[in-house]
Image (cartoon, grey):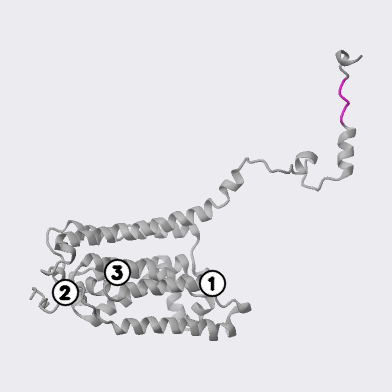
Amino acid sequence: MTADGYDISLNTDPWRFQLHLEIWLLVVALVVGYVYAVRVIGPKIAPEGNVVTRRQVVTFSLMIVLLWLSTDWPMHDIAEEYLYSVHMVQHMSLTMFVPPLALLATPEWLFRLILGDGKVRRAARFLVRPAAAALVYNLMVMVSHIPQVVNLSASNGPVHYLVHVLLVTSALILWIPVCGPAMDWRVSDGAKMIYLFAMSFVPTIPAGWLTFAEGPVYRHYDTPVRVWGVSVISDQQAAGGIMKLGGSVFMWAVIIYIFFRRFMGGFYREQSYRRDSVMPDSEVTGSDQPLTFEDVQKAFDRTRPAPENPHTSA
């Protein structure tokens, strides 16, 4: 029995199989809902029959796989009962990977249909402004790392799922200005890079706290059952490193991708000095107009004949 009343006598085998029926129901509901939307609703309201692209279907499939792996056995159980570092990997997946994939997989018509035209849409439009989105997401991140919240959520199933729902919702708000389905809700490429760069520094605070703490921060994870032999302090330090480096590296990778796509896309093509196999007409005529026979004749008429070399005459 730990200090918070967590009985480990029934949980000495970290790898025992645990069925999470609610996760399977969630995954099935998402898949059925998506298929119904693109097969039944989409053909009726999608503009010009552009219901869904193959890339969006592949992205949705990848999102579902990541969501399932992050919330089902064994990751969910190890994260909830034994290792906070695995808990952090789970949160990284649910905030950094699953939300942007879900947004990229959602057609714009479906996104607007879900929000509607009333108060929900107006509230969402306000919350996804970069300043508001950053505040909502970072506030949720800070709250989710308060020791009392972590200890309660890790030992209470409904609270644990509520925290996950709030984290995923705040992450969706965070990512809509970057890769949301509605193009008019996105910010410019330059603003995206600044926005993500600023967001990459915020996790430094709780990450540093976890990394340099001298004792266990969360009583729930101070259990004698040590998966892979990882001590509670090493587990805590690994969680801090994952929180800092995992999110930051991913956001920096997105920044680099945006930079090269937006600002370096045509650089090498425009700066190339490789000669083409066909000389452009403008090199001969001095203009971009097509070269004609009259142009060639005029060019020959303006050319003086080469002087005869007396040494070559007989």
Residue 154 locus on image (x, y percent): 20, 75
Residue labelled with disc 1: 54
Dot 1, crowdedness within 10 Å: few (<14), some or many (≥20)? few
Q: Which residue is mark 2?
A: 13
Quadrant of residue 134 in the image? bottom left
Viewer can see residue 148? yes
Q: Position of residue 54 (x, y in %)?
A: 54, 72
Tell me the crowding category of disc 2: few under 14, some 14 to 19, or many 20 or more residues within 10 angstroms, Cα based.
few
Element type at mark 2: loop
Q: In front: mark 3 or mark 2?
A: 2
Q: Which residue was labeled with disc 3?
A: 90
How far apart in space, not on screen, are marks 2 and 1 (Cα)? Answer: 43 Å
Q: Which residues are magenta?
A: 303-307
Q: Is residue 305 magenta?
A: yes
Q: Residue at x 50, y 72 (%)?
A: 56
Point out the residue furthest to the right here.
314
Is residue 173 at least partly visible in the picture?
no
Dominant secondary structure (helix, strand or loop) of the stretch shown in magenta: loop
Q: CA distance from mark 3 to mark 2?
A: 20 Å
Mark whose residue sits in front, 2 or 1: 2
Residue 120, percent across and down? 44, 81
The residue under label 1 is which amino acid type?
Answer: Arg
Are dots 2 and 1 in contact, CB under 8 Å? no
Mark 1 or mark 2, which is nearer the start of the sequence?
Answer: 2
Where disc 3 sits, the SS reads helix
